[in-house]
Image: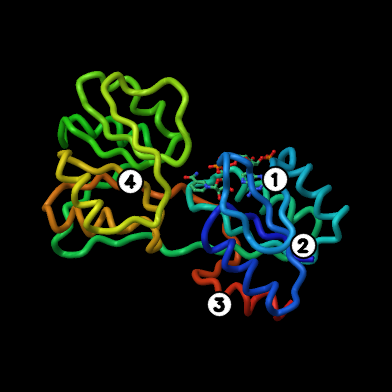
Amino acid sequence: MILILGGTGEARQLAEELTTRDVRVVSSLAGRVARPRLPVGEVRVGGFGGPDGLAQYLRENRIEAIVDATHPFAERIGANAAKAAETTKTPLLRLARPGWRPGPRDVWHWADDLADAARQLPGLGRRVFLTSGRQGLPAFAHLDDLWFLIRCVDPPGPPLPRHHELLLARGPYEVAAERALLGRVDVLVTKDSGGAQTSAKLTAARELGKPVLVVRRPSRPDTETAETVPEAVEWVLHR
Ligand SMILES: NC(=O)c1ccc[n+]([C@@H]2O[C@H](COP(=O)([O-])OP(=O)(O)OC[C@H]3O[C@@H](n4cnc5c(N)ncnc54)[C@H](OP(=O)(O)O)[C@@H]3O)[C@@H](O)[C@H]2O)c1
């Protein structure tokens, strides 16, 4: 049985590819999203209880290998997976799509984390398209002089910035619609999530000449890594 730590499109694709090759997989979701897109095959939902809980799960369920296909900004589960894999001697692969890179016409500013993005933001504009996700919103809640168009999947709880409009949506997004949203703001804030599902906003910002504040990826444990689903399929089939 292969454990896929999920919550991404790549994790769902991997579950599908492995299932069609008769590899037994169980996909794990954190349970953050109210109505998640479910992968094919077996699914479990909720935290494991830290690295020890995960190690226990690996033993009890006779997991032969783990693919950590979680989002590039899901920091904690990556470290937990590395620790649990080490203690149980379970092979671990990190599946992570490459980050985005600016082209010649892009006006990008980099932030080290969400707090740094909040520090830089007032210098970049007063109307902000904030797409960095529900969990990161408290970092921007004190910016009373700015107006935010906040896009996230599920309704966020407090604290939220005083002046904002909420847009509940889930990708993939189209360039034309992103252009319309970006027409209403001075600056876009995004994490460096990478991939095609949510990159239309970057194309739209480029076309409109709008600045983008990009939050750098947090560091991850140094593990064997694949950038694409086919690479991860090969890795599993070689086990
Ligand atoms: N962060 C983002 O920007 C983002 C964006 C899109 C999707 N996601 C997905 O949303 C999930 C949660 O993200 P996060 O940033 O809150 O993660 P995180 O900070 O790395 O994880 C916090 C805790 O949530 C549990 N957890 C996380 N991913 C899990 C999984 N796939 N299966 C079971 N438990 C999981 C673990 O709890 P225990 O310690 O109790 O095991 C972990 O310690 C991830 O699976 C990720 O792929 C995150």
The x, y position of residue 120, in whole percent, is 24, 34
Residue labelled with disc 1 = 45
Residue type at mark 2 is Thr
Mark 4–mark 1 contact, CB under 8 Å?
Answer: no
> Mark 3: is the Cβ under 8 angstroms from ligand 1?
no
Residue labelled with disc 3 = 230
Colouring used for the render: rainbow
Q: Is residue 124 left or right of residue 86?
A: left
Mark 2–mark 3 Cα distance, whole angstroms, equals: 21 Å
Indicate which disc, 4 or 1, sits on the residue closer to the N terminus: 1
The x, y position of residue 47, in whole percent, is 69, 41
> Mark 1: is the Cβ under 8 angstroms from ligand 1?
yes
Q: Which circle, 4 or 1, is nearer the viewer?
A: 1
Indicate which disc, 3 or 1, sits on the residue closer to the N terminus: 1
Mark 2–mark 1 Cα distance, whole angstroms, equals: 21 Å
Q: Is residue 206 left or right of residue 32?
A: left
The x, y position of residue 139, in whole percent, is 38, 28
Residue labelled with disc 2 = 90
| SS at circle 3 | helix
Mark 3–mark 4 contact, CB under 8 Å?
Answer: no
| SS at circle 2 | loop
**Rendered-image quarter of ligand 1:** top right
The x, y position of residue 18, in whole percent, is 67, 73
Q: Which circle, 4 or 2, is nearer the viewer?
A: 4
Mark 4–mark 2 Cα distance, whole angstroms, equals: 34 Å
- How many neighbours does mark 2 have within 10 angstroms: few (below 14), some (14-19), or many (20 or more)? some
* Residue 11 versus residue 129 in the image, above or below: below
Residue at point 22%, 57% (across, down): 176
Residue at point 37%, 63% (across, down): 196
Residue type at mark 1 is Val
